[in-house]
Amino acid sequence: MPPSPAPPSPIPPALASASPPPAVLPPIGHTALLLDFDGTLVDIAPTPDAVVVPPDLTASLRTLRARLDGALAIVTGRPVEQVVVLLGDAVEVIAGEHGGAIRHAAGQTLERIDLPMPPEAWFAAGGRIAAAHPGVILERKAQGFVLHYRAVPAAGKALGEAMAALVAGSDRFVMLAARKAWELRPRGADKGTAVEALMRRPPFADRLPVFIGDDVTDEDGIAAAHRLGGVGLRVADAFASAAGVRAWLREAAAKGTW
């Protein structure tokens, strides 16, 4: 007679304030762990290319990937290629560009959703908006761009107004507020659609998702995890910081349980 599955793990006290998780986390053997990157796994840096990946993070992720039988993924707004450079082979499954591109396994061709491209004039306009506010960084993505204003917080309101004017009247693109940033991207893909796409395929299928994120753009992933019967946790509520997430992952990797 096969052994009974392990009982669900009570949410640790550090996670008890997360809103609104169920009473328990799924046992690690029944969990699909889906993690945002910036602000969740690594500390927010002044610029996207200045993030620091602590060596023990990649070690924890490798161990957890084995304990989860591969059901570990990064779900991020960054391009997949950037995450590969930063994490190496620690994580094989990566949903990048807010779900617009998914790598289901190392070495596989990216699965891309058919999404519209912004007019080239919008990219040029984004450059002019950034240039008008010294310290603002324009990050171009495959199907949109981000204006980062961490170095000049006072510019946030003006940048938001300029970007809103740029996309006004468009039903194919959306402007999103992120942490000290404004992002323009196409409708049709978000972290929620990424979670749903991953959960339809092995090794995630038949498991319960646990999604962890820190920003407005992660709310879709949190909502999708709840819809699928799993748990969505906000970093500030559940762990206080990315360092808290890393400590939790390190302990789970060592113990083999949440």
Image (tube, helix red, strand yellow):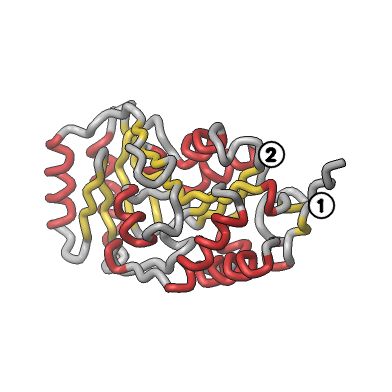
Whole-number angstrom distance, CA of label 2 to CA of label 1: 16 Å
**Left or right position of 59 against 206:** left
**Label 1 sits on what residue type?**
Pro
Percent coordinates x, y for residue 166 in the rendering: 23, 38
Q: Name the residue: 72% across, 61% down.
A: 16
- In the current view of this chain or complex, which residue is farthest to the right? 1
Q: Name the residue: 34% across, 55% down.
A: 84
Q: Name the residue: 54% across, 55% down.
A: 65
**Left or right position of 89 against 133:** right
Q: Which residue lies under the disc numbered 2?
A: 229
Q: Nearer the viewer, residue 188 or 3?
A: 3
Q: Name the residue: 37% across, 32% down.
A: 187
Please tell me whether mark 1 sits on a helix, a strand or a loop.
loop
Q: Which residue lies under the disc numbered 1?
A: 7
Q: Quadrant of the C terminus?
A: bottom right
Q: Nearer the viewer, residue 195 or 237?
A: 195
Q: Earlier in the sequence, mark 2 or mark 1?
A: 1
